[in-house]
Amino acid sequence: MRIRSVEPFILHAPIAQGSISDSTNTISHWGIVGARIETEDGLVGYGFTGTHAHLASDRLIAACIGDCYAPLLLGEDAADGDRLWLKLARHPALQWVARAGIAHLALAAIDIALWDLRAKKAGLPLWKLLGGATVDRLEAYNTDIGWLSLTRDALVAGCTRVVEQEGFRRIKIKVGHDDPMIDITRIEAVRRAVGPHVTIAVDANGKWDLPTCKRFCARAEALDLFWFEEPMWYDDVRSHAALAAATAIPIALGEQLYNADAFEGFIGAGAVHYVQPDVTRLGGITEYIRVADAAHARRLPVVAHVGDMGQVHVHLSFWHPATTMLEYIPWIRDCFVEPIAIEDGHYLPPQAPGAGCTPTDAALQAYRMPLRG
Ligand code: MG
């Protein structure tokens, strides 16, 4: 599997329901910034990272793939995944500027494409290559009905619909108003509508400070929240540890962390209960496995954040024994040859060889953005 070419690409896929907001962002498209890697024996692997479809920064990621990493990969054997990950991630010149941020998103796209190649070479879906499914069923929790930009009536209607008509038993609601009591009333309305047996998680996307979180939790504990996700600034271990000690609501985080060391900081401090790695930010599947294994060693559940909208994480989640469920946001499913699939609130295991990242020709044509201005 000698690597013959590495080419970046950028797709901006529109969100079907229009623009949505959480406490920190408003977006109308999801960015798929990827790597296409071809080997001399004719195999083609795809990997990508997920972005907010900001073209200028997407071009920086694509340039990192094409200009920094591609020359290091040409002629290499794509089977040597761990060695190549170290070659890119620990390259002296790149490590100086690239232990996180844009370069790590580029590394993720490359690493996923290399895994995609190896799974295609083996003729197996990635979860099978990794060791097989450790669960019979993989429950999905629905985030796509919980946006902060929805009115309270629309929020309640969407949550009720997916529970009563689509079989979801787990939902997540965005929070993060300047006045957290507005969020409390929204959650109360949803709890009344869906009843006591549906789990409700909430996600502040890092918006609040510790006093606001304590005030929110004091009222929210009566609402039986499944977890409180990213309550505060993403890197603030000490405040998350303090909140975890102060409330009965479990803390979830990880989507903004770039490496296993960052996770170890939160895990070691007792600052996280649900570990949420994202393969598109972590430098790929290789580092994701290190994080999931570290969580498993502490018997902490892993529930991935779907920066890939589930295309890769569905494989990792069926396989890794620490996983208990997976987020569901179906924005880009139509962009892929084998899209994620749900039945009665549960994911179906992918069947095609690879890591689920091969874009359709139609998506490449319709959503491709120019690499240079
Ligand atoms: Mg989140």
Image (tube, helix red, strand yellow):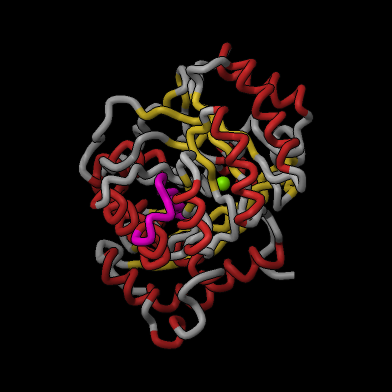
Task: Look at the image and tell me in which quarter the C terminus lies.
Answer: bottom right
Please state the horizontal and vertical placement of residue 192, each as a whole percent of the image: 63, 17
Question: As displayed, is residue 329 above or below residue 87?
Answer: above
Task: Look at the image and tell me in which quarter the N terminus lies.
Answer: bottom left
| Residue 114 makes an appearance in the image | no
| Residue 300 makes an appearance in the image | yes
Residue at 64 percent of width and 57 percent of height? 209
Residue at 21 percent of width and 43 percent of height? 131
**Magenta span covers which residues?**
268-280
Question: As displayed, is residue 282 above or below residue 162?
Answer: below
Residue at 58 percent of width and 41 percent of height? 217
Residue at 24 percent of width and 45 percent of height? 129
Q: Quadrant of residue 152?
A: top right
Question: As displayed, is residue 300 above or below residue 91?
Answer: above
Please state the horizontal and vertical placement of residue 202, each as a whole percent of the image: 58, 38
Please state the horizontal and vertical placement of residue 73, each as a whole percent of the image: 38, 73
Question: As displayed, is residue 265 above or below residue 230?
Answer: below
| Residue in front for this viewpoint, 206 or 255 | 206
**How many numbered circles does the render carry?**
0
- Left or right of 100 in this view: 128: left
Please state the horizontal and vertical placement of residue 335, each as a whole percent of the image: 57, 40
Q: Is residue 243 magenta?
A: no
| Residue in front for this viewpoint, 371 or 281 | 281
Q: Main secondary structure of the magenta part?
A: loop
- Left or right of 239 in this view: 184: right
| Residue in front for this viewpoint, 210 or 312 | 210
Most extreme residue toward the left is 131
| Residue in front for this viewpoint, 9 or 257 | 257
Q: Is residue 272 magenta?
A: yes
